[in-house]
Image: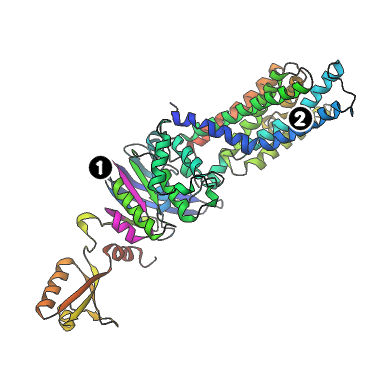
């Protein structure tokens, strides 16, 4: 059973997310969204939010801003989520308290994910105030899917190594490059030896497709959602098992 | 309460080289006891404490705290722990750090402000409450480290790793008083330190660790006394120093005129003093040249320290 102290600690974890993890990508997203809306309102761009064209443009602004905010915030949030405490020695203070290590980091992961989803909704709502009706629920679902995949994979890497951030970027880039190559040239498939590697790499293409659909106000598609959520969940479970077994200091 | 049976811990490097940091250690510590751990750098003290706290698993042997795996014990009850390395996020303020750690320590929300106030007052860090940790001196940071360990006063296991490192003499003495008040029949206090004098003052027994093994366990507290068997003394005589030299075979005169007596036990010391006094000596001072613990330490680590 989780102790009440651990649950109460969630407010500190939420504060850490806001101050240390989300501030830079939020400023970037607000800058991009704000600049576009400002330019439109000053007549630099021929945008009338009430028309179909205006609504489509508003969704493009949303996509541009959130395509920066979600991946960047998710990466920053999950980077060093557990490896940082091991590296800096914080584990000696945190885990001499009556706290289960996997529970502590799972709670951190959940709080960060929840904050990301809430911020995604808040940002969309803010943009809506200056433009037109936007898919708030879709933006929040996109945030949740991004966190499931980026956050889940980052959580796993962080339990294994202090180089988790670099490995996460590498895995993500490799996945994007290989999957894009396969998609662009279906007539010449990838070499057979690469296929098992591609299969275990994160389904970045599925996430991109789901997010694009969601920003446009459509459904993400159950296939993409299941793939992304299943992959992220598997990483999370594996990471939790590793946290249960591994030494806290080396 | 603590039982180690043939506990070993090996580290393997990437190239396959194995280092045995703790080697076949067996030890029992009863509830109510204050155990010291002394040893030179790299002796295995910190690895031993890391296993006791469940941060590391032994590669061989068993370690139990109150019959439980150490990690299970810590997760169930918590440990009052002051690490050697004061590693907390430096942007936290003292107040914030104590509130966070009290929350994790499961101090009830209603009692938390009072618990923080109590340790702030105990460690006299009130004027630093609003400061960031990075703005603190080493000694004040160490006091915050001790304060966070005392946020709950019901911990049954207390572990201090070099607790007075960075503290000035006043706070070193104050720390000893705090440890004295922490003694409880159902609590074990473990103190690892390089400072033998400190261990001698606060512990019941001291385990001397070297090359990963417990070389010796020395009883130092209470009835064992400071001058247990085979301690050396320096004696100053206001008159009749020849009688003192005659009473202690092998005694030598120092350049200051004092008489250095080799390792003798308490009955031998008292018999010698009686003989010297009977022979006309007027004794003004008897000082242990080194404590029994120091003697045992030198003997156990072979001068490595």
Instruction: Spot the residue most to the front.
Output: B127
Report x, y in % for residue B144: 45, 48
Q: Which residues, given as a range, are shown in magenta?
A: B184-206
Report x, y in % for residue B191: 35, 51
For this view, does A228 lie left or right of residue B2? right
Tag 2 residue? A65
**Label 2 with label 1: CB-CB less than 8 Å:** no
Tag 1 residue? B185
Q: Quadrant of the N terminus of chain A?
A: top left
Q: Going 22% across and 79% down the picture, which residue do you hit?
A: B251
Q: CA distance from mark 2 to mark 1?
A: 62 Å
For this view, does B280 lie left or right of residue A106? left
Up/down of B130 relative to B212, above or below: above
Up/down of A220 relative to B231, above or below: above
For this view, does A240 lie left or right of residue B255? right
Report x, y in % for residue A16: 58, 36
Q: Mark 2: few, some, or many residues within 10 Å (few <14, many ≥20)?
A: many
């Amino acid at each position: 059973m989780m102790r009440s102290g651990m649950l109460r600690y969630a407010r500190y974890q939420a504060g850490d997310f806001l101050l240390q993890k989300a501030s830079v990508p939020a400023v970037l997203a607000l800058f991009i969204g704000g600049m576009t809306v400002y330019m439109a309102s000053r007549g630099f761009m021929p945008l009338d939010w009430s028309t179909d064209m205006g609504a489509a443009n508003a969704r493009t602004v949303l996509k541009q801003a959130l395509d920066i905010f979600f991946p960047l915030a998710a990466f920053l949030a999950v980077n060093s989520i557990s490896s940082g405490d091991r590296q800096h020695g914080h584990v000696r203070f945190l885990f001499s308290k009556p706290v289960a290590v996997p529970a502590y980091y799972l709670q951190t992961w959940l709080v960060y994910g929840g904050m990301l989803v809430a911020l995604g909704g808040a940002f969309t709502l803010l943009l809506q105030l200056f433009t037109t009706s936007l898919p708030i629920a879709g933006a929040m679902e996109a945030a949740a899917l991004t966190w499931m995949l980026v956050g889940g994979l980052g959580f796993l890497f962080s339990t294994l190594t202090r180089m988790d951030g670099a490995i996460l970027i590498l895995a993500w880039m490799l996945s994007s490059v290989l999957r894009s190559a396969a998609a662009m040239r279906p007539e010449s498939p990838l070499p057979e030896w690469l296929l098992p590697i591609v299969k275990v790499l994160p389904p970045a293409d599925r996430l991109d497709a789901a997010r694009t659909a969601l920003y446009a106000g459509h459904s993400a598609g159950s296939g993409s959602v299941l793939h992304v959520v299943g992959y992220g969940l598997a990483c999370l479970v594996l990471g939790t098992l590793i946290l249960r077994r591994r030494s806290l200091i080396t | 309460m603590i039982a180690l049976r043939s506990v070993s811990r090996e580290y393997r490097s990437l190239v396959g080289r194995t280092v045995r940091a703790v080697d076949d250690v067996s030890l029992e510590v009863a509830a109510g006891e204050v155990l010291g751990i002394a040893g030179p750098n790299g002796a295995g003290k910190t690895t031993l404490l890391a296993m006791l706290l469940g941060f590391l698993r032994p590669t061989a042997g068993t370690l139990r705290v109150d019959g439980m795996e150490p990690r299970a014990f810590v997760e169930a009850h918590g440990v009052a722990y002051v690490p050697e390395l004061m590693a907390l996020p430096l942007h936290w303020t003292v107040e914030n750090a104590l509130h966070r750690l009290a929350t994790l320590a499961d101090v009830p929300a209603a009692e938390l402000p009072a618990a923080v106030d109590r340790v702030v007052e105990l460690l006299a860090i009130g004027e630093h409450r609003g400061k960031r940790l990075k703005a603190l001196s080493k000694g004040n940071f160490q006091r915050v480290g001790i304060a966070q360990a005392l946020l709950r006063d019901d911990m049954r296991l207390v572990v201090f790793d070099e607790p007075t490192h960075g503290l000035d003499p006043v706070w070193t003495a104050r720390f000893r008083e705090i440890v004295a008040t922490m003694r409880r029949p159902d609590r074990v206090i473990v103190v690892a330190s390089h400072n033998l004098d400190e261990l001698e003052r606060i512990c019941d027994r001291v385990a001397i660790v070297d090359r990963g093994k417990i070389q010796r366990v020395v009883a130092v507290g209470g009835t064992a006394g400071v001058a247990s068997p085979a301690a050396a003394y320096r004696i100053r005589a206001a008159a009749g120093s020849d009688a003192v030299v005659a009473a202690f075979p092998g005694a030598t005169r120092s350049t200051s005129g004092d008489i250095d007596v080799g390792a003798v036990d308490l009955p031998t010391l008292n018999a010698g003093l009686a003989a010297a006094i009977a022979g006309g000596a007027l004794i003004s001072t008897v000082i242990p040249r080194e404590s029994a613990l120091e003697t045992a330490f030198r003997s156990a680590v072979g001068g490595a320290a």
